[in-house]
Structure formats: structure tokens, C-alpha cells
Amino acid sequence: MVKDHTIIWKECLNIVRKSIDNQPYKTWFEPIKPVKLENEVLTIQVPNKFFYEWLEEHYVSLLKKAIRQEIGHNGRLEYQIMVDNHKKIGVGNSLPKIINKEEIVSTSIPNPFVIPGIKKVRIDAHLNPNYTFDQFVQGECNRFPVSAGVAIAKKPGGTAFNPLIVYGDVGLGKTHLIQAIGNKILSDHAEKQVLYVTTEKFTNQVIQAIKSNSVNDFMNFYQMIDILIIDDIQFLANRPKTQEIFFNIFNQLHQAGKQIILSSDRPPKDLQDVEARLISRFKWGLVADLRTPDFETRIKILNKKLENENLVLSDEIKEYICTHIKNNIREIEGVVISLVAQSSLNRRSIDIKLVKEVIRQFVSHVDQEISVENIKILVAKHFDISVDKLGAKTRLREVVMARQLSMYLAKNYTNNSLKVIGDSFGGRDHSTVIHSLKTIQDLMDTDTLFKDKVNQIVKKVKTNLVSV
Ligand code: ADP
Ligand code: MG
């Protein structure tokens, strides 16, 4: 009996299925439709060029193997690409290359991703399944972006939070949070196409698409996404072509009521070398920041990570970890993982000595007490004034600023009380210290140059201590 294209393709699929995971199989092979078998050439139909290139890039040897096995040594494969205007065009493939120029008018297929007779498949969302809301500890520091995220997950594209931009320093949970939104949508909205991509990867895809002359297919692919999540958009800086393509995709998705979720290490207004028209789009929706967690929240996060690792620590040790790691949750996680490794591999019991050793790897200045005196010296040097002036009664603008900044740093980087800090600046009372903290915080929130300057000083405060 002569086998026809459907049977041959079915057998090829059996071979493919044995070699790859279920998810990529569903994504890349289920939507393929066998078209015909003529002279040992099997023609299959793929939804778009992007799809074809993906297959060629990732599965060409597997396909070769299957075709050879099923058709014989002279077996070849050809692709037909479905294009938007419901036409199919042919494209040759690499075994050996034959260009199939025929154009066939296909039956009505409104969405190039949905092939009649085959259930709409979900593309791989590229989400880490562990990044869920359940695993994301909530506190004052993240209440706002989390509630926006929860609202979006209920009604993607249907809230005012479009786009949602989550920003914050490294290690504060941006990636976790934006992926949690994606994971929640995956589980609650079966029909939605979710895609997570880093800006780095997106940029590479753009470069590839330009090189291979397939920008249109690339854009078509992105247009069928319902929830597009792009991480670390600060890396769009200085990439005008990527920005342009992203701008177009953004507009099309937004107009179609699709949800866009972005993360950045700074607020949109501070993104450098990103076109104004993009930045203005970013402000259409909601911009929400992730702040550093307070002590209680850090303890809760630590507990969550310990629970995941089945590790029990004393309260004293937990408090020690959370007083020494303040600004980066990834570091808390790193400590937990190191402790697990130390205790299981080296069979060491986890005592405060071990914890101190481990923390030292993560926080270089941990055992160096930062003193108010040290801060005063550095700040005075920075402002080019004498240290005495910081405690003096002068109201000179420059001196006042230096004094307020020193108090701010003293509060944030030492364990001294407001009273002790006030005392070290010429006996000022604690309300003066509070006022200074607020002034500096306000300035940092509104003036990026100032914030950068403070960060420079903070770095100095820290590094200086390491070398002391
Ligand atoms: P960012 O993208 O902002 O650099 P990540 O999302 O990669 O930060 O977070 C760093 C690590 O800290 C991740 O492993 C994440 O699970 C964890 N993390 C961050 N915030 C929280 C939180 N609120 N609760 C639990 N884990 C968190
Ligand atoms: Mg991240």
C-alpha cells in the first residue's frame, strides 16, 4: 500500500515526539499540516516564516532523520508558509534546497496560528513555573505593584494598568513578580497566549529578523500574543532599531486591547537613550515600584525560602541574616542555598559562626561596622568642607545639605538611634534628624542627578570600610 502524506507525517511525528519534550512538541509540531507527498518530497504547511525558521534552526536534524526513515534516503521536505492574506507561499528547505514557488489560495484562516482541524496551541510562554504569587511574599514594599498585578491577572488587557511597568533595584523581585502575573494568567485563562521575553533576547530576535529579512513575520508572531511580558527594558537604551520595532508591536498590541507588562531598573522618565515617544507610551498605564523590604518582610521572605528548602534556623540566626542583608532578596536566597549546601555536603551544623562566614561571601562589608564618624569624613570630603562644619551652627546651603545627607546615611547605614545621630551633629534633636531624612528622601525621589550622587557616596561609604 502506498502511504499518503497524512500517514507519512503522522509517522514522522511519532519519531519527533520520542525525541523532544511535550511542550515544544505541542508548540512547534502540532500546528503543522501535511499538504502533499510527491516524488519523495513531503510538503508541510507552517503558520509563518518565523515558525519555519525556528524549525530550521532547532529541529532540522530531527526532521531530516524522520523524513529519511519514513520516505527513504532521497526523501525531502518542503515548507509552505501561510501568510496573513490567507495565501500560502512556498519556501524550500535545506535538504537540499528547492524553492517551491507555487501560490495556493487557502481556505479562510483568520489567524495564521490556528490551523483548521487542530486545536489552537499555546506557544511556550517561557515562564519559570516557580515564580508564582504564592511564592511572592507581600509587604508594604510591594503592595502596590502586587495588587496591580493581581488585577491584571484577573482581567488581562481589561484594566487601566496597560502597560504595567514594574521598576526597582536589582534583586527586589521584578522578574519574579512579572512572571507571577504571567503564570496566573496561564492557569486562569486557557485561551490566552502569554509570552515572557527579556529585552536582551528580544533585541537578538530583532537582529536575526533583520538579517534574514523577516521583520514582518517577526512582527506577526508578536501580534498574536495576548500578554506580552518584557523584562529589563533599560537595555533598550541605544538600540534605535529595536526600539522602533518594539514601538510598533506595542502600539498594535495596545490598540487591540492586549496586555503589556514591562520591568525596568529605573522609572521610565529616567531611561536613557530611549525615544521620547516610547517613554510617553510607558506612562499610559501604571508605573509601580518595588522597594526594599523592611525587616519583618525580609524575615517572612527568609521563612518562605527556608520552607522551600526544608531548613530550620533559630530566630537568632534568622534575625542575624535579615539585619545584615537589607537590599537584595537574591542575596537572602543565596545565603539559604549556601547554608543548605554547607550543612548537607560538609555535614556542618548551622550555627551563627557558619552563618557569618556565608554572609561574608554575599555582603563584603558585613563585619565592618559603619560609623557615623566615617560617614561624616566621607561626606565632608565630597562637599569639600571640614568635618567640624557638619556639627556647627551654620545655615550655609552647602553645609546644611552635607549635614542632612550625613544624617540620612547614618540612619540608613548604621544602627544608631535618631537621638544618637542628632547628638553626633552638634546636639540636634531627633525631629531635626527626621526632617533631614525626609528632605534627602524627597530630593532623591525627584532629582536623579542627586540620587546618583548619593549612590556614589554610598558606594564610597561601603568600599572605604572594606579597605579600613
Ligand atoms: P530582579 O528581577 O528585581 O532583579 P528577581 O525577581 O530576580 O529580582 O528576584 C531575586 C530573587 O528574590 C528571586 O529568586 C525571587 O524569587 C526572590 N524574591 C524577590 N522578591 C521576593 C518576594 N517578595 N518574595 C519571595 N521571593 C522574592
Ligand atoms: Mg530581573
Image: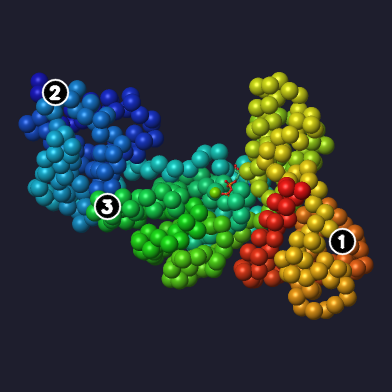
Q: Is residue 147 visible?
A: no
Residue at image location 37% in from the left, 50% down from the top: 204
Q: Residue 185, percent across and down? A: 49, 48
Camera-nearest residue between 457 and 317: 457
Residue at image location 32% in from the left, 41% down from the top: 119
- Left or right: 20, with 442 as reference point: left
- Left or right: 48, with 255 as reference point: left
Pointer 2 or 1: first along the chain: 2
Mark 1 element type: helix
Camera-nearest residue between 19 and 269: 269
Q: Which residue is mark 3?
A: 211
- Left or right: 386, with 364 as reference point: right
Q: Is residue 203 visible?
A: yes
Q: Amino acid at mark 3?
A: Lys
Camera-nearest residue between 416 and 13: 416
Q: Amino acid at mark 1?
A: Ile
Mark 1 neighbour density, 10 Å: few (under 14) some (14–19) many (20 or more): many
Q: For residue 16, what is the image quadrant?
A: top left
Q: Which residue is mark 2?
A: 72
Q: Which residue is mark 1?
A: 421
Residue at image location 62% in from the left, 69% down from the top: 449
Q: How far is the residue under mark 2 from the one under mark 3?
A: 34 Å
